[in-house]
Image: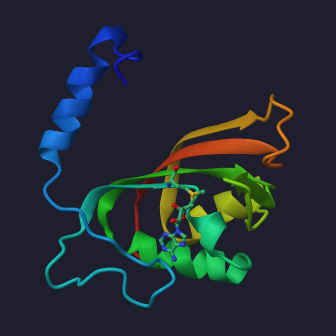
Amino acid sequence: MAELEGNSAVWTHKEEELKRRIKHLLKCDVSAENLVDERTVPKADCLLTAWILETISQDETSYCNNFKKMSALLKLGGHLVLIGDIQGSFFIVGGHKYHILPIGEEFLRKTLEDEGYSIVFYSAVGRNAEKQTTNYEKIVCIIARKVRER
Ligand SMILES: C[S@@+](CC[C@H](N)C(=O)[O-])C[C@H]1O[C@@H](n2cnc3c(N)ncnc32)[C@H](O)[C@@H]1O
């Protein structure tokens, strides 16, 4: 962000500012039926998810269900930032191999549209390193606005 604003030297200040604004940390299991207690946690203006949905979902149906549960945390008019892998099936960390769900860009776009999102920014960057620790084809970064409730 600091680099985009033309002043990458002040990123430590941004980090401090972000930390200062965090009010609560809540742990949640995205595979559970209810992610948070909706009576006490207000809907958010912005929801960021990075490499979670493809990690925890066994198939496209469970990806859509997990997406719906996350999406319920976001206000109508709020923005979703979704970062993830395209057509990856594993990653290795600390010698452990974790399986992930390979998903395509068309599936991702359709999931967002079906769930009431309008995509305002879409970037897909191909893999340029031949690492053996993962096999994704692209990384996507999407910003989408929630324009209707399902
Ligand atoms: C590929 S890592 C991504 C981590 C982080 N979001 C990032 O961008 O670096 C996948 C993460 O999913 C988390 N995870 C696995 N099962 C989960 C679940 N049921 N609910 C929430 N998070 C889960 C793991 O703890 C792990 O941190």
The one of 132 and 10 positioned closer to us in this rendering: 132
Estimate the x, y position of residue 110 in percent, counting from the top left: 67, 64
The answer to whether residue 131 is left or right of residue 85 is right
97 up-or-down from 59: above or below: above
The answer to whether residue 5 is left or right of residue 120 is left
The one of 66 and 147 positioned closer to us in this rendering: 66
**Colour scheme of this structure image?**
rainbow
Name the residue at the bottom extreme: 33
**Residue at left 36%, top 8%?**
6
The answer to whether residue 31 is left or right of residue 137 is left
Residue 150 at least partly seen = no
For the N terminus, which image quadrant? top left
Estimate the x, y position of residue 4 in percent, counting from the top left: 41, 17
145 up-or-down from 42: above or below: above
Quarter-of-image position of residue 149: bottom left
Residue 65 at least partly seen = yes
**Residue at left 40%, top 60%?**
146
Estimate the x, y position of residue 108 in percent, counting from the top left: 67, 60
The total number of labels drawn is: 0
The one of 54 and 81 positioned closer to us in this rendering: 54
Quarter-of-image position of residue 40: bottom left
Estimate the x, y position of residue 17 in percent, counting from the top left: 17, 33
**Residue at left 22%, top 38%?**
18
For the C terminus, which image quadrant? bottom left
The one of 109 and 84 positioned closer to us in this rendering: 84
Quarter-of-image position of residue 24: bottom left
The answer to whether residue 41 is left or right of residue 146 is left
**Residue at left 34%, top 19%?**
2
72 up-or-down from 10: above or below: below
Name the residue at the front extreme: 95
